[in-house]
Image (cartoon, rainbow, N blue to C red):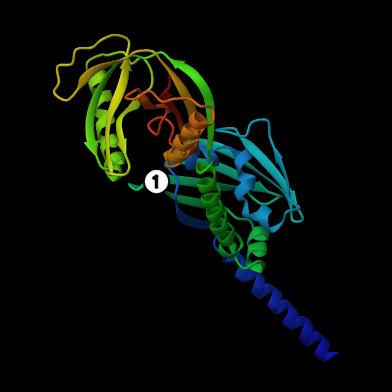
Amino acid sequence: MKTFKFLILLLLVFIIGFCIYIAVQPNSFEVIRSKTIKAPQSVVYNNVIDFKNWEAWNSWKEENPETIITLSEQTEGVGGSYSWEDEDGVGNMKTTATEAMNSITQEMQFGDFPSADVNWNLKPNEDGSTEVTWTITGEDLPFQFKMFSAFMGGMEKQIGPYFERGLTLLDSVLQAEMKVYSVKVAGITQHSGGYYLYNTTSCKFSEFEKNMKSMLPKVGAYAVTHNVTMAGPPFILYHKWDEENDAMIFSCCVPTNSKIISDEVGILTGKLDSFRAVKTVLKGDYKNLKEAWEATMKYIAANNLEIVEGGAMLETYSKDPMRHPNPADWLTEIYVEVK
C-alpha cells in the first residue's frame, strides 16, 4: 500500500512539474526560412500570390499525397484562400495583405489551434535571382497548444524542415516553368514594312548580346524623349551573318508611323518596303533562337523557296523582358525575305 501511495505521489509530482514546464514555455513562436531562388522577383511573386500554384511545391502534400486540397472561388490576391484536410485535421489559409512584388501577408488556421501569421518577403538580387524569406508567427498561445508543441518537439522542428523543402521545390518549379518554349513556323506571310529609327554596329557573335542590350534602349529612349510614336515592337535587322569568320552586322530598330529626321549622331532613319517572308514564332527564352532560325531555314529548303540576296532578315520582339520578366512569356517573330 505504501508503495502504491508513493507511486501516486510521484505521478502527481511529475504531472505538476510537467504542467509548470508547459506553463513557462514562450507564449509565442516564430519560424523563419530563407532561400535564394533563381527567378526574377515578379515571377516568384506571381506564383506565390495565387494559391492554385501551391500544390506543385507543397512539401506537406509531397510527404502525404492523400492530403485533400480545396481551392476557393478566389485564389489570387487579397481575399484569396484555400483549405486542406489530412489525417491530422482541417486547415485553411487566406491572403490578407500584399505589397506588389515585395511582400505577401497571410493568415493560417489549423483545427482548433490559434491562427498564425504567415509572411513572404521578396528581395531582388542584381543577378536576377530573388532572396525569398518565408516566416510564420503565433501569439498568445494557449496551454493546450504549448503542450502539443512540446510533445512534437517544438515549432522549429514541426515547420522548419517543411519550409526548407517547400522553398527548394518552389525554386525547381519556377526554373522548369521558365524553360518552357515552343517554335512554330507559320509559313509564308507579307510583312508590311515601314519606317524605323535605328543604330547599327558590326561585331563578333560573342559580342552580340552585350551590344544589343546597350543599343536597343538608346533607340527607344530617343523615340520617347522626342515624342515619337512607335508603330510596333522593336526589332533587330541583320545585314551580315558570317559564322565562318565570326562576324555580323546588325541594326537595333524601333518602327515609326512616319519618316523621322534624327538630330542625334548614331540614330538614323530607315525604311523597309513591304516584303514576302517566311515567318517563325518563338515563344520562350532567347536561348532557343538558334533552333528557331534553324527551323526557318529548314522550312525554306523543304519548300524550295529562295532567300532574297541582301533581303530583310529580322527578329521582332513582341513580348520582351522589359514588360514580361518570365522568359517563358517572351514572344519573338522571325521574318526572312523570300522570292
Q: What is the quadrant of residue 12 in the picture?
A: bottom right
State left or right for residue 23 relative to residue 243.
right
Q: Position of residue 254 (x, y in %)?
A: 31, 21
Task: Tell me if residue 35 comes above or below residue 84 in the rendering.
Answer: below
State left or right for residue 213 relative to residue 276.
left
Q: How many marks?
A: 1
x 76%, y 53%: residue: 66
x 64%, y 31%: residue: 74
Badge 1 marks a residue whose secondary structure is: strand
x 60%, y 41%: residue: 53
Residue 99 appears in the rendering: no
Location of the C terminus (image quadrant)? top left
- Report the front residue among 231 and 271: 271
Q: Residue furthest right?
A: 1
Q: Position of residue 221 (x, y in %)?
A: 25, 24
Task: Tell me if residue 244 comes above or below residue 293 in the rendering.
Answer: below
Q: What is the quadrant of residue 257 in the picture?
A: top left
State left or right for residue 298 relative to residue 6.
left
Callout 1 environment at 10 Å: few (<14), some (14 to 19), or many (20+)? some
- Report the front residue among 60 and 270: 270
Task: Tell me if residue 154 comes above or below residue 40 in the rendering.
Answer: below
- Disc 1 target residue: 123
Residue 240 appears in the rendering: yes
Task: Tell me if residue 197 comes above or below residue 248 in the rendering.
Answer: above
Location of the N terminus (image quadrant)? bottom right
Type of amino acid at the residue the image marks with label 1:
Lys
Q: Position of residue 118 (x, y in %)?
A: 54, 47
- Report the front residue among 300 and 143: 300
Q: Position of residue 29 (x, y in %)?
A: 54, 58
